């Protein structure tokens, strides 16, 4: 059974106690500039075998992320601490996974000297503010999608990351899945020919979940599920800006989108037709059509374990963690964690699988969809 409706529908879905700037450079000479400090930090990390994580949030998605981190091989990631709105909730989470430190605030996570990178898995209306505050506290950040409500907000966060010389990545975890990497290789190889059409749909009955039906909680399907369809289209068309975007959506009485259809038209005549709904369960599939063949991505298309390519069928095993997952194929979260580790070891401030430009391409489309449909975006 598909359990996507559970995501973040839990008491820890809202945050409090936002961070203030924390000086994490006290171990170095005060005359050192941030760029120098980052070089020292990267050099120190590159000599480590284990990436040390701090977790902000104790809900379903954080549970899945930590379980994926601890999947075999389990000697490359360590969860140092977890922070939640309430200490008791953080402690329960820590006990479940054997995490040594639990905090009743996110500021304490950012202040922990043993943390290399922070994963933000709280409700999305707080992603922008929390990302900026943790970056300013001197930590690298992997933040769940959607990071932002609009393009201007993601640009703000990215600029803070640049100014602070810290790694930042929007957790569009699909991009790190080995199946997606093979799909990109197939497209770039020319085996598919010219891209003609992308058909993708995300259909799940989650309209009664608070984060979907309440505009003050960032409600609506666009930012929650349609973003997955949009990121697939922007990946296939290599971040090319569509020459035309057409969007239609059905809105609730409060102005949040219950379902919608987005059509992207590209300069070569190629199209992407993206359908999403929070009202019913349907087939969550994707097909990429080219002039020489097609690619069929298995369900769920955002976390697939198989795909049919012109060169043949490919499969991928999903890592199994110590605690059962809440969402389908959540073991794939391990792949984005491994990407972060490789980036930090190499001293990179962006991930090649989800670059700043990749996120910007997604929000360019989201902004236009909001403009055309009149979705009530309050965050």
Image (spheres, grey):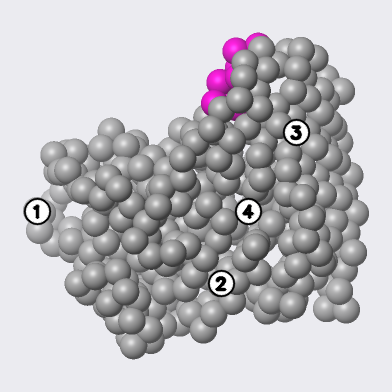
Which label sits on residue 287?
Answer: 3
In the picture of the structure, the residue carrying the numbered disc 4 is: 152
- In what element is the residue under mark 2? loop
Q: Residue tagged by mark 2?
A: 8
Q: Are marks 3 and 4 in contact (CB under 8 Å)?
A: no
Neighbours of disc 3 within 10 Å: few (<14), some (14-19), many (20+):
some
Q: Main secondary structure of the magenta part?
A: helix
What range of the chain is rendered magenta? 182-190
Task: Give the class, few, some or many, for how many residues have Cα within 10 Å of label 2's Cα (few <14, many ≥20).
Answer: many
Quadrant of res 63: bottom left
Q: Is residue 368 visible?
A: no
How many tags in the picture?
Answer: 4
How far is mark 1 from mark 4, CA to CA? 36 Å
In front: mark 4 or mark 2? Answer: 2
The span from disc 1 to disc 2 (Cα, nearest Å) is 42 Å
Q: Evaluate if marks 2 and 3 touch, with contact meaning CB atoms under 8 Å apart.
A: no
Label drawn at residue 29 = 1
Q: Could you tell me which residue is drawn at 81 percent across and 64 percent down?
A: 280
Q: Badge 1, how many Cα within 10 Å: few under 14, some, many 20+?
A: few
Task: Compute the Cα span from label 3 to label 1.
Answer: 55 Å
Mark 3 or mark 4: whose residue is earlier in sequence: 4
């Amino acid at each position: 059974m598909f359990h996507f409706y559970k995501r973040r529908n839990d008491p820890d879905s809202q945050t409090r106690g936002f961070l203030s700037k924390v000086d994490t450079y006290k171990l170095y000479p005060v005359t050192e500039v941030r760029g120098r400090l980052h070089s020292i930090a990267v050099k120190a990390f590159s000599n480590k075998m284990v990436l040390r994580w701090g977790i902000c949030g104790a809900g379903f998605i954080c549970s899945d992320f930590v379980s994926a981190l601890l999947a075999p091989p389990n000697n490359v990631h360590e969860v140092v601490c977890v922070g939640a709105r309430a200490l008791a909730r953080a402690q329960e989470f820590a006990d479940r996974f054997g995490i040594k430190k639990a905090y009743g605030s996110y500021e304490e996570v950012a202040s922990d000297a043993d943390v290399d990178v922070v994963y933000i898995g709280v409700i999305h209306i707080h992603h922008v503010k929390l990302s900026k505050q943790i970056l300013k506290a001197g930590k690298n950040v992997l933040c769940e999608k959607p990071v932002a409500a609009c393009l201007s907000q993601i640009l703000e966060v990215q600029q803070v990351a640049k100014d602070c010389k810290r790694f930042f990545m929007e957790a569009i975890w699909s991009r790190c899945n080995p199946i997606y990497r093979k799909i990109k290789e197939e497209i770039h190889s020319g085996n598919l020919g010219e891209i003609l059409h992308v058909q993708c749909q995300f259909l799940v009955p989650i309209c009664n979940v608070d984060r979907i039906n309440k505009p003050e909680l960032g409600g609506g399907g666009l930012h929650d599920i349609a973003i997955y369809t949009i990121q697939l289209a922007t990946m296939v068309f290599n971040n090319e800006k569509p020459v035309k975007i057409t969007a239609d959506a059905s809105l609730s009485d409060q102005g949040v989108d219950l379902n919608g259809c987005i059509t992207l038209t590209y300069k070569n005549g190629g199209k992407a037709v993206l359908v999403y709904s929070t009202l019913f369960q349907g087939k969550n599939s994707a097909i990429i059509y080219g002039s020489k063949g097609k690619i069929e991505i298995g369900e769920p298309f955002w976390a697939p374990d198989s795909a049919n390519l012109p060169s043949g069928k490919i499969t991928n095993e999903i890592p199994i963690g110590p605690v059962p997952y809440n969402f389908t194929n959540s073991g794939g979260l391990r792949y984005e964690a491994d990407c972060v580790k490789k980036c930090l070891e190499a001293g990179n401030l962006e991930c090649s699988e989800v670059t700043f430009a990749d996120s910007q391409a997604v929000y360019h489309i989201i902004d236009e969809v909001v403009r055309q449909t009149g979705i009530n975006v309050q965050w």
